[in-house]
Image (tube, rainbow, N blue to C red):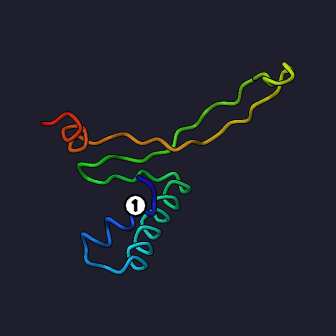
């Protein structure tokens, strides 16, 4: 399922025009992105939690040339499924 599919499903289930449904999806995703950029945790009850994790800098290798290169520290988004989602996935 991609963003267009999600927009279509939301529009159908909420009886909204597709344009309005797309706006709502954009608002939600932008709000989550903004919170993560501020390193805030975002929890959606029974669905899951979005957080930011730090990956330390390390020395890697360029796979094309084999030369050593420094990979800088990075922040990466992490999603941890909530109890409700885990139960739904496992048919409980």
Instruction: Identify which residue is drawn at 39% across, 67% down.
Output: 7
Q: Quadrant of residue 92?
A: top left
SS type, badge 1: helix
Question: Residue at position x 61%, y 33% from top?
Answer: 55
Residue 38, percent from left and from top: 54, 56
Q: Position of residue 50 (x, y in %)?
A: 42, 48
Q: Can you name the residue that lies furthest to the top here?
A: 66
Q: Position of residue 31 (x, y in %)?
A: 46, 65
Q: Which residue is mark 1?
A: 5
Q: Is residue 17 left or right of residue 30?
A: left
Q: Is residue 28 left or right of residue 91?
A: right
State the residue in front, 41 or 84. 84
Q: Position of residue 23 (x, y in %)?
A: 44, 75
Which residue is painted at 78% across and 23% down in the image? 63
Q: Decide if residue 16 is on the left or right side of residue 40.
A: left
Above or below for 49 versus 65: below
28 is higher (above) or lower (below) than 81: below
Q: Quadrant of residue 83?
A: top left
Q: How many marks?
A: 1
């Amino acid at each position: 399922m991609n963003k267009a599919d999600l927009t279509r499903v939301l529009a159908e289930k909420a009886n909204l025009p597709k344009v309005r449904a797309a706006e709502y999806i954009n608002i939600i995703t932008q709000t989550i992105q903004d919170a993560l950029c501020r390193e805030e945790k975002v929890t959606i009850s029974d669905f899951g939690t979005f957080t930011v994790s730090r990956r330390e800098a390390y020395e890697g290798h360029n796979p094309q040339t084999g030369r050593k290169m420094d990979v800088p520290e990075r922040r990466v988004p992490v999603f941890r499924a909530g109890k409700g989602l885990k139960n739904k996935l496992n048919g409980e």
